[in-house]
Image (cartoon, rainbow, N blue to C red):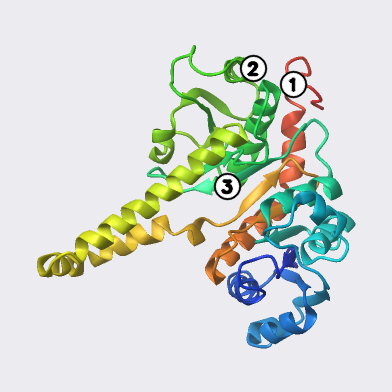
Amino acid sequence: MSGPRLAIDTMGGDNGPAAPVAGVAHAIGQHPDLAFTLFGDEAAVAAEVAKYPALAGGLVAIAHAPDTISGEDKPSQAIRRARTTSMGLAIQAVKDGGADAAVSAGNTGALMAMSKLALRTIPGIDRPALATLLPTLGKHDLVMLDLGANTECDAQNLVQFAVMGAAYARIQNGIARPTVRLLNIGTEELKGTGELREAAGMLRAAPHLPLTFDGYIESDRLGRGEADVVVSDGFSGNIALKTMEGTARFVTDLLRRAFTSSFRSKAGFLLSKPALHLLRVQLDPNNHNGAVFLGLNGIVVKSHGGANAVGIANAIEVAAKLARENVIARIVEDLAKVSTAPVKGAA
């Protein structure tokens, strides 16, 4: 039985089609049932594809796209060029049924705008949210959303994010009832904005949902493995994510400086090398690559712009898993369990 077909925007990353095509070759090595349509400059993409014998078996098709969305393009500009760009055509393939999911390393704002316009939101979802997986000290990665798609959110949006995040956690981590917490400035019930307190009350009043609401969490506890899903508005979530990424780079740079400061330090580095390698693997964003726009009538996964082949392959794996497990149907099913009184537009 064949697996999902994925539409890949090969021109959206920092270095043209080289990394996306290498990522596709890496993904096929791990999941030979996958099929791909690669959107981009046909000659440039074909030259990269020719480098990988694994891509010669008919699992990869190339669709020419004469235009590309740059990192400087505004979402409004991108929308006007959707029909000629590699990003827009990849999304359109999902809408038309020619692909089960799309993956792009391009401009996040443009990707969100075009995806929302083409695919629309699931009935019962007011706004899509950007969700990603973050490493923790626990057994599972953390699902965190929203990470920048919506700078302002009301309580209903936060509850909908909780439902979508829990569905994602069940698929990605195999957890029957994921623990969900709201990102806040404290864990006391009276802390935070009115929207946060209202959302907490709504989640506490809905024990029939396939999740376990466990109150608030502060940003310094995100990596401790104390929650399966953390929900936030996009403004706070994006700041928290960027702070975590910056701290990881800061610690890595401090260690590098410390281990090169003297001969004794260099000797200590050799003894610590296995542990430091494990740390580097855990902190490498390529190993946790692939953020998803949850809440759309189609699967769209955002890769880091500078992702290497392993990073692209991980984003592809996220997209393929969500397609196989039919995340959209799961979200629709869960929304039907939310009372229509507290959540506007629930099915």
Label drawn at residue 152: none
- The kind of secondary structure element at disc 2 is helix
Q: Quadrant of residue 178?
A: top right
Residue 144 x/y as whole percent: 55, 40
- 10 to 106, vertically: above or below: below
Residue at mark 2 to residue at mark 3: CA–CA distance: 24 Å
What residue do we see at 69% from left, 30% from top?
160
User: Quick check: 244 left or right of 147?
Assistant: left
Q: Amino acid at mark 1?
A: Val
| Number of the front mark, 2 or 3 | 3
Q: Pointers 2 and 1 in contact (CB under 8 A)? A: yes
N-terminal-most mark, 2 or 1:
2
Q: Amino acid at mark 2?
A: Met
Residue 229: percent from left, percent from top: 54, 36
Q: Quadrant of residue 338?
A: top right
Residue 177 in view (yes/no) = no
Question: Which residue, given by chain and number where applicable, does mark 2 sit on?
Answer: 202
Residue at 58% across, 19% down: 200
Q: Which residue is mark 3?
A: 132
Q: CA distance from mark 3 to mark 1?
A: 24 Å
Using the image, determine if residue 104 lies above or below residue 143: below
Tell me the quadrant of the picture where the C terminus can be found.
top right
Q: Which residue is mark 1?
A: 343
Of callouts 2 and 3, which one flags the residue occurring earlier in the amino acid sequence?
3
Residue farthest toward the top in the current orientation of the protein: 190
Q: Are marks 2 and 3 in contact (CB under 8 Å)?
A: no
| On screen, residue 246 above or below 35 | above
Rate crowding at label 1 as few (under 14), some (14 to 19) or many (20 or more) other CA atoms within 10 Å.
Answer: many
